[in-house]
Image (cartoon, helix red, strand yellow):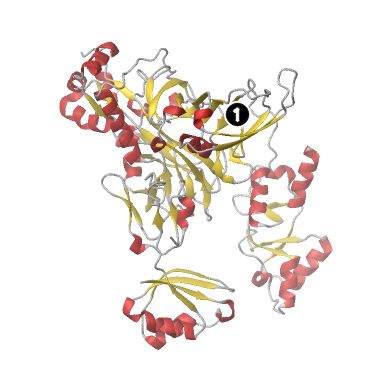
């Protein structure tokens, strides 16, 4: 049995005799020496990760103006921050986007610009009080001018993350990057073998108060992150660090096309090897860390799982889906994760960084809950018109024109002999057929690629599809492609009229 | 070399590509083709020595031919080497080397621009 204390390890750090390795190096050490041998040999294992962490932000204090202002609303380079705090405190969220430049520039970009010493335009408004009479403020600041500039990141360093793919026929732009149609690619995030929480999955040494590497400076874990979900292996951390001490090599703003702004954070956590259990845990390999590949074609909270996958497969460059090799892309940087683990190793080795025990452990059980929703989301079946006129594909265009005229209904659902939806025909299609003087069967003039929706889909999803493709109606079909009704932009506007 | 062949609306109904290949006997390897009823744009690989001849044949039929000699440019300062670009590139321009650095094989680039949209750090640009 090996038993070491943090104090013993810190004494070794002080006198330079500490043995510190990265979590990648630890894999082979434990293979060779076994967990007990490795625990005797190694004092500290360093981890690292460098990826998109949207749930990050900057708590800052501007100092008081003359005359003073109690800021009610504030913008930094036209990116709004939250200032419902005392007079000149504000919290700038990394994912907030610019009022003028949109998702190309967000809170994360302001944070990086501050760190790079750039000047930032500040605009603030207030309602004015006897003690804070000023109502408008405009100034230009740099990082130096702020009293405090502390990153307070509610959810960072996910233990692991679900990979993403797309079964649909169109490109999806997501926070997991561009997902190509028909399982064209898989994107993933996380440092695998170097992931901090995956190397201490029982959260024995990583907890409240743990000193860490954060953005190139010393920071701290201040508790579990939001949506901490240890029972499913998706633990998260809440972190704090001083922006003024950070380095832009380890903190980078980013923007995902069609999604928005985010902050890439570099995080490294040292794990003191107090016993052989921790030595064994830090020998975790990419192969041992299993996550899922989820289908982002389903715009729902619970996305279908295509398959399980481990980080070794993800990092190999391709994974198999339905017998096909699908290329993978990492969204986090393994090269930088490794750089962080090595940098932290040097700090420890040269007595610049001491390890710590948590003042309180993170909870090791529990799952993040979904949102409680008290207002039912209207479904397609609640608002669709069940009355729909159908026509068989081999009927004539004249039959179709007659049906439209008789029913004063603009969309005809075209069905096969067995009643499956095969197309849609509008008055416009008929006008076109007449204009071009080519009208034999309905099948030859109908639109074959029909957008459809399911009865149990939320109306919001149907509305987004109508809007995206610029169509005014979609047939509602069941799993057998039988037509149940139609949803039109009219149905949706009526729903909204009821709502407001 | 990689070339771009643009077919304007007024010529879209003529079999320009086929005619040019038949006339010159020069084979071109079409890598990307976007053609609809109003416009056409193709990217193809052609032997350097035969470029002038096929260019003349295509242009005499109303196509516009240009050499794609400005492949994608990666800003190494902005790039954090995540590898997001790797899986979206249709030509496998990007790969990781042994140290997980992103390698760019510019010769393969057909300037489609897909990677530009994918890059979270705005590190990729065309025409520089």
In the image shown, does B55 or B25 lie closer to the viewer? B55
In the image shown, does A500 or A300 lie closer to the viewer? A500
SS type, badge 1: loop
Q: Residue at x 53, y 28 (%)?
A: A145
Query: Can residue A21 be seen here?
Result: yes
Q: Which residue has dot 1 on it?
A: A371
x and y, in percent, of residue A328 in the image: 38, 48
Report the side of B36 relative to A404 (left or right).
left
Q: Quadrant of residue A497?
A: top right
Q: Chain of mark 1?
A: A
Q: Quadrant of the N terminus of chain A?
A: top left
Q: Is residue B73 above or below residue B58?
A: above
Q: Quadrant of residue A27?
A: top left
Q: Quadrant of the C terminus of chain A?
A: top right
Q: Is residue A115 above or below residue A152?
A: below
x and y, in percent, of residue A443 in the image: 65, 69
Mark 1 surroundings: few (<14), some (14-19) or many (≥20) residues within 10 A: few
Q: Is residue A446 above or below residue A60?
A: below
In the image shown, does A402 or B67 lie closer to the viewer? B67
Report the side of A291 relative to B63 (left or right).
left
Residue at far front of view? A66
x and y, in percent, of residue A268 in the image: 36, 29
Tag count: 1
Query: Can residue A296 be seen here?
Result: no
x and y, in percent, of residue B79 in the image: 40, 47
């Amino acid at each position: 049995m090996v038993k070491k204390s943090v104090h013993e390890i810190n004494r070794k750090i002080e006198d330079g005799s500490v043995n510190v390795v990265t979590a990648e190096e630890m894999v082979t050490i434990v293979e060779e020496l076994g967990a007990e041998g490795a625990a005797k040999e190694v004092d500290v294992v360093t981890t690292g990760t460098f990826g998109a962490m949207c749930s990050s932000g900057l708590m800052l204090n501007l100092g008081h103006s003359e005359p003073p202002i109690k800021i009610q609303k504030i913008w930094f380079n036209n990116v709004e921050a939250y200032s419902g705090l005392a007079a000149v405190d504000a919290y700038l969220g990394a994912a907030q986007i610019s009022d003028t430049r949109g998702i190309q520039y967000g809170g994360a970009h302001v944070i990086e610009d501050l760190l790079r010493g750039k000047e930032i335009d500040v605009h603030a408004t207030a309602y004015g009080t006897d003690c804070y009479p000023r109502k408008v403020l405009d100034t230009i600041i740099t990082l130096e001018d702020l009293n405090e500039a502390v990153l307070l990141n509610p959810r960072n360093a996910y233990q692991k993350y679900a990979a993403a793919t797309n079964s649909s026929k169109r490109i999806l732009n997501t926070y997991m990057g561009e997902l190509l149609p028909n399982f064209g690619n898989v994107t993933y995030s996380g440092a695998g073998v170097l992931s901090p929480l995956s190397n201490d999955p029982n959260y024995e040494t990583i907890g409240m108060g743990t000193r860490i590497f954060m953005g190139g400076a010393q920071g701290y874990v201040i508790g579990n992150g939001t949506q901490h979900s240890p029972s499913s292996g998706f633990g998260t951390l809440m972190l704090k660090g001083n922006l003024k001490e950070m380095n832009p090599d380890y903190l980078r703003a980013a923007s995902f096309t069609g999604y928005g702004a985010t902050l890439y954070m570099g995080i490294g956590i040292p794990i003191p090897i107090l016993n052989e259990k921790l030595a064994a845990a830090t020998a975790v390999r990419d192969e041992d860390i299993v996550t899922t590949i989820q289908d982002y074609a389903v715009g729902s909270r619970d996305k279908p799982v295509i398959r399980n996958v481990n980080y070794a497969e993800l990092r190999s460059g391709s994974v198999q889906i339905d017998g096909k090799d699908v290329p993978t892309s990492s969204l986090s940087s393994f090269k930088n994760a490794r750089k962080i683990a090595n940098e932290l190793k040097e700090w420890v080795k040269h007595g610049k960084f001491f390890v710590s025990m948590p003042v309180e452990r993170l909870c090791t059980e529990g799952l993040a809950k979904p949102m409680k929703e008290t207002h039912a989301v209207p479904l397609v079946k609640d608002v669709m018109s069940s009355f729909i006129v159908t026509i068989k594909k081999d009927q004539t265009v004249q039959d179709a024109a007659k049906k439209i005229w008789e029913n004063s209904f603009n969309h005809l659902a075209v069905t096969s002999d067995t009643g499956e939806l095969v197309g849609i025909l509008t008055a416009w299609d008929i006008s076109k057929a007449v204009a071009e003087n080519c009208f034999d069967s309905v099948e030859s003039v109908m639109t074959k690629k029909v957008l459809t929706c399911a009865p149990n889909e939320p109306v919001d999803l149907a509305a987004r599809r109508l809007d995206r493709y610029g169509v005014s109606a979609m047939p509602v079909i069941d799993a057998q492609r039988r037509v149940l009704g139609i949803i039109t932009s009219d149905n949706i506007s009526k729903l909204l009229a009821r709502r407001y | 070399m990689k070339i771009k062949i643009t077919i304007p609306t007024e010529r879209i109904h003529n079999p320009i590509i086929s005619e040019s290949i038949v006339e010159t006997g020069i084979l071109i390897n079409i890598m990307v083709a976007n053609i609809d009823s109003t416009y056409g744009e193709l990217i193809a690989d052609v032997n350097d020595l035969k470029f002038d001849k096929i260019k003349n044949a295509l242009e005499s039929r109303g196509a516009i031919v240009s050499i794609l000699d400005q492949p994608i440019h990666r800003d190494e300062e902005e790039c954090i080497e995540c590898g997001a670009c790797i899986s979206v590139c249709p030509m496998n321009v990007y790969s990781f080397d042994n140290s997980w650095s992103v390698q760019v094989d510019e010769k393969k680039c057909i300037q489609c621009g897909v990677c530009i949209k994918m890059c979270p750090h705005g590190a990729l640009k065309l025409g520089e």
